[in-house]
């Protein structure tokens, strides 16, 4: 997989997305590091606390064993010394072997359980002199044990802790106060070497504390690079948007190795440009056809006016010229009205006011009004509709225009003595209305284009090419459709397909 090389510039503005992404990335990692450090610190504290608790138990067990031996030795004046020696050094005379056998067995079990044979144990006087110690406690380490020794100041059983260093090893030391039966004050010292885990935790904490600022600095640097890579498509879109003009809308952002979200953004931008290009082409084509439709009547009006004003003419010629001007003006007004209506249909669908009404009654009313127009041309009109009520949900005014456009064309192009038949049927949840005439028909190659705006056949009497487009647009806004079948010399049949009210409302 090939990755694009990005030129990273660090002129980040504080109110930019790049700056926010970088800060957020650094902040999240910083919080994670702090939480991790906190957990590590709590773990280390818990670990050290566990060591101290274990030292307490060891010192306490040594204390109890010394007292148990001392009690077993009875009134012997050297009972304390023998008891400490048997406990700490695990050697020395034992004149009461049978009496202390159970104590020795219990103590050996405790030594094994607590690993006391690996620890450093000492028994010192109040004056700071070690009188008994374990075999592994060397003289230099005993001296370190006695340095800055802190005797617990209160009642028997109190302890103090400190950490010492010996041969590059950390040793955790407990000092436990011991008061014998005669009131003599001594101290029990137990030291345990802190192992590799303890050293690792300490070193880790130190390393984390030192490395957090460095990591955050590097994170900020990496965050800027990532932010630049993430926002590269946005910058590409920005650069491209500045180059797009109404004269050239063909530019597109090429598909690259973008992330899914950015790819969606690029695709959406390209789709938007495609729609804009189509809209501009539509506006250009629309403007061209509109100018062409208005140019012809204006040229006729201008020509008639210039002709009639060249010299004095009889009243009949003035009347004829005015008649031409009136007809062409009416044609221009009709074209302008159609253009305005198409604009509203395309961009202001809110002009439709839908209500429920009986379609059969509506169609009958249109039929009766159209018969008057047909009678003037000696065109016979018929209507066939099933019985019953057929409710639809539609805009009555615009639906009326749809039917009048098609019926008016049928009557207009049907020769005298011809026929226009309106047939209404109901199929399932749809109402089908067929308007058939006996006119000249439409050529097969023109059938697929008659609903296009400004399209006209070779017959110049087909109007401005907007009526059928308006009718089809109105039908689609009513969830319907208009289809046509025609043969030259036999007539045409337009079928208007509309849904019943319960289908639309569902």
Image (cartoon, rainbow, N blue to C red):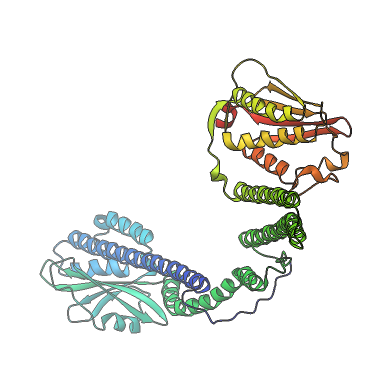
Specify whether residue 449 is in view: no
Residue 381 sits in which quadrant?
Answer: top right
Q: Is residue 139 above or below residue 259?
A: below
Q: How many marks?
A: 0
Q: Position of residue 420 (x, y in %)?
A: 76, 26
Q: Of 103 and 325, which appears nearest the observer? A: 325
- Residue at far left of view: 182
Q: Residue at x 73, y 69 (%)?
A: 2
Specify whether residue 456 is in view: yes
Q: Position of residue 203 (x, y in %)?
A: 44, 76
Q: Is residue 499 above or below residue 138?
A: above
Quarter of the image for the N terminus: give it.
Answer: bottom right
Q: Residue at x 65, y 76 (%)?
A: 6
Q: Of 261 and 130, which appears nearest the observer? A: 261
Q: Is residue 353 above or below residue 387?
A: below
Indicate left or right for 255 with 198 as reference. right
Q: Is residue 382 above or below residue 164?
A: above
- Residue at far top of view: 387
Q: Of 476 and 335, which appears nearest the observer? A: 335
Quarter of the image for the C terminus: give it.
Answer: top right
Q: Residue at x 66, y 71 (%)?
A: 240
Q: Of 361 and 332, which appears nearest the observer? A: 332
- Residue at far right of view: 489
Q: Position of residue 14 (x, y in %)?
A: 46, 77
Q: Position of residue 327 (x, y in %)?
A: 71, 48
Q: Residue at x 15, y 66 (%)?
A: 156
Indicate left or right for 360 with 29 as reference. right
């Amino acid at each position: 997989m090939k990755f694009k090389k990005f030129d990273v510039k660090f002129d980040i503005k504080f109110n930019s997305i790049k700056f926010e992404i970088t800060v957020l990335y650094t902040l999240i990692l910083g919080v994670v590091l702090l939480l991790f450090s906190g957990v590590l610190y709590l773990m280390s504290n818990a670990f050290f606390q566990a060591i101290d608790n274990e030292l307490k138990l060891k010192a306490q067990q040594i204390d109890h064993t010394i007292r148990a031996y001392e009690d077993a030795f009875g009134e012997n004046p050297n009972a304390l010394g023998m008891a400490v020696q048997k406990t700490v050094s695990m050697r020395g005379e034992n004149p009461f072997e049978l009496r202390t056998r159970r104590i020795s067995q219990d103590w050996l079990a405790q030594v094994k359980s607590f690993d006391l044979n690996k620890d450093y144990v000492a028994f010192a006087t109040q004056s700071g002199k070690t009188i008994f110690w374990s075999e592994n406690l060397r003289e230099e380490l005993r001296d370190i044990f006695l340095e800055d020794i802190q005797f617990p100041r209160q009642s028997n059983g109190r302890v103090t802790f400190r950490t010492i260093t010996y041969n590059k090893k950390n040793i955790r030391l407990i000092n436990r106060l011991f008061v014998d039966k005669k009131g003599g004050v001594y101290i029990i010292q137990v030291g345990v070497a802190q192992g590799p885990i303890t050293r690792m935790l300490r070193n880790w904490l130190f390393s984390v504390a030192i490395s957090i600022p460095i990591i955050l600095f590097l994170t900020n640097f990496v965050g800027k690079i990532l932010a630049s890579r993430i926002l590269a498509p946005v910058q590409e879109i920005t650069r491209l948007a500045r180059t797009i003009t109404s004269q050239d809308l063909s530019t597109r952002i090429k598909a690259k190795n973008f992330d899914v979200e950015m790819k969606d953004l690029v695709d959406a931008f390209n789709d938007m440009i495609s729609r804009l290009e189509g809209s501009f082409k539509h506006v250009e084509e629309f403007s061209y056809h509109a100018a062409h439709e208005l140019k012809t009547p204006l040229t006729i009006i201008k020509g008639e006016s210039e002709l009639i004003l060249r010299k004095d003419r009889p009243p009949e010629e003035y009347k004829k010229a005015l008649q031409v001007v009136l007809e062409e003006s009416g044609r221009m007004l009709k074209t302008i009205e159609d253009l305005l209506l198409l604009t509203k249909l395309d961009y202001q669908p809110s002009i439709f006011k839908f209500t429920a009404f009986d379609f059969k009654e509506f169609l009958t009313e249109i039929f009766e009004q159209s018969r008057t127009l047909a009678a003037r041309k000696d065109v016979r009109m018929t209507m066939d509709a099933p019985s019953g009520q057929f409710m639809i949900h539609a805009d009555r005014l615009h639906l009326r225009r749809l039917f009048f456009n098609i019926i008016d064309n049928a009557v207009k192009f049907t020769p005298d003595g011809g026929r226009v038949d309106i047939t209404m049927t109901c199929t399932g949840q749809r109402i089908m209305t067929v308007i058939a005439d006996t006119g000249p028909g439409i050529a097969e190659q023109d059938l697929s284009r008659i609903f296009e705006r400004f399209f006209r056949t070779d017959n110049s009497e087909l109007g401005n090419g907007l009526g059928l487009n308006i009718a089809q647009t109105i039908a689609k806004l009513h969830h319907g459709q208009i289809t046509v079948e025609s043969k030259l010399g036999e007539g045409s049949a337009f079928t208007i397909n509309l849904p019943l009210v319960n289908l639309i409302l569902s």
